[in-house]
Image: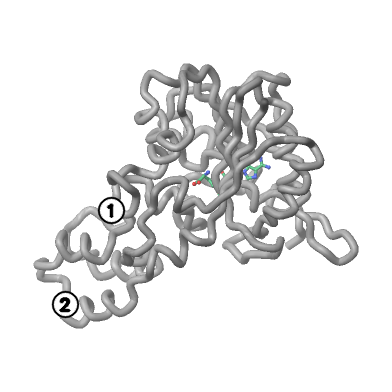
Amino acid sequence: MKEHATREFYKYGKKARYFMLDELTLSHLLRDRNEFIEAGLPYGAAIARAVVKNNTDYVLEIGPGLGDLAIKFMEHAQGKVKHYVFLDISKDLIKHVKKRVNGMSVIGDAMLLPFKKGSIDLIICNEVLADLPIKRVNGKMINDGAIKAIRECIRLLRKNGKAVFIEVGGKAKRISVFGHEEYTIDFDEIERVLRKNNTRYERGKIAKLLGINTKLRFVSPVTQAELVELYKNSGMDKHKFSKIYSLEEFFTTFGNEKWLSKGYKQYLKKNARAIRELVEQFDYITIFKD
Ligand SMILES: C[S@@+](CC[C@H](N)C(=O)[O-])C[C@H]1O[C@@H](n2cnc3c(N)ncnc32)[C@H](O)[C@@H]1O
């Protein structure tokens, strides 16, 4: 698969109904109330808590996926945000999000945003940068697409506006995901670009920004397929099992169910992963338009 094929994958091939199977995003795992984030907030609400400080006219979310972040964000920011705009390259995802989120939808590319200079107060871009193309310069991979998208966001921001980017950090290298390619984001390189551009920024770990307790272990969705298999005949709602559970919560909820054998309980205890393993991969960078 060629490097730019990721764009084609999203533009033409990305279907909302396969989204949960193709991708395991942090925002999906934590999309409902959960034990991992302070005060039990869903992921989108935790983002709103961290970034919406004042009344805000225009929020733009780039690459909303299925819209879970947007829904919880707006619930939490209630009254403080006037307009929610979401932009995605995938027509099918936009169609899906339109049904779920009250806002203005735009089909477009993060690297060429179809909005006027100085028109947006707050931009949220969660787990999208890794999907944008890279460029090789003297054998080194550069997150070229991510840098283009960030430059576009700087152009769009109003005075006192800010843009928050969340992504897996590390030297730019390929991550293998179903059907397309992703690249970790070299935040040091992004910082260099921002310094050159005299843009103020703040960078850190997502666990700190959102208040995620990294000590807990979770019943991994990697074992989810097995869980679904196991519960198929238990007559319970399959959707329930696509939720992330801390080991403790899982046993409190299902511990006494007949279908949960002793052997499987032991298996889960042994295989539950620390949420830290996943969360610590994620960095954020917020840029400010002074
Ligand atoms: C990994 S998903 C993340 C979705 C969502 N933000 C979340 O956290 O679950 C990447 C999203 O970015 C969108 N996307 C990928 N490339 C894009 C581009 N060049 N311009 C705009 N959206 C893009 C995809 O269609 C998808 O909605």
Image check: 35 left or right of 121? left
> Where in the figure is residue 62, as x and y percent of width and height?
59, 36
Residue 14 appears in the rendering: no
At x 73% / y 20%, what residue is drawn? 117
Q: Work out whether 232 lies above or below 185.
A: below
Q: Which residue is mark 1?
A: 35
Q: Which residue is mark 2?
A: 261
Image check: 80 left or right of 155? left
Q: Work out whether 256 lies above or below 10.
A: below
> Which of the four quarters of the rendered structure image does ligand 1 lie in?
top right
| Residue 263 position by quadrant | bottom left
Identify the secondary structure beneath mark 2. loop
Q: What distance separates the C-alpha of mark 1 from that of mark 2?
A: 24 Å
Image depth: mark 1 or mark 2 in front? 1
| Residue 196 position by quadrant | top right
Identify the secondary structure beneath mark 1. loop
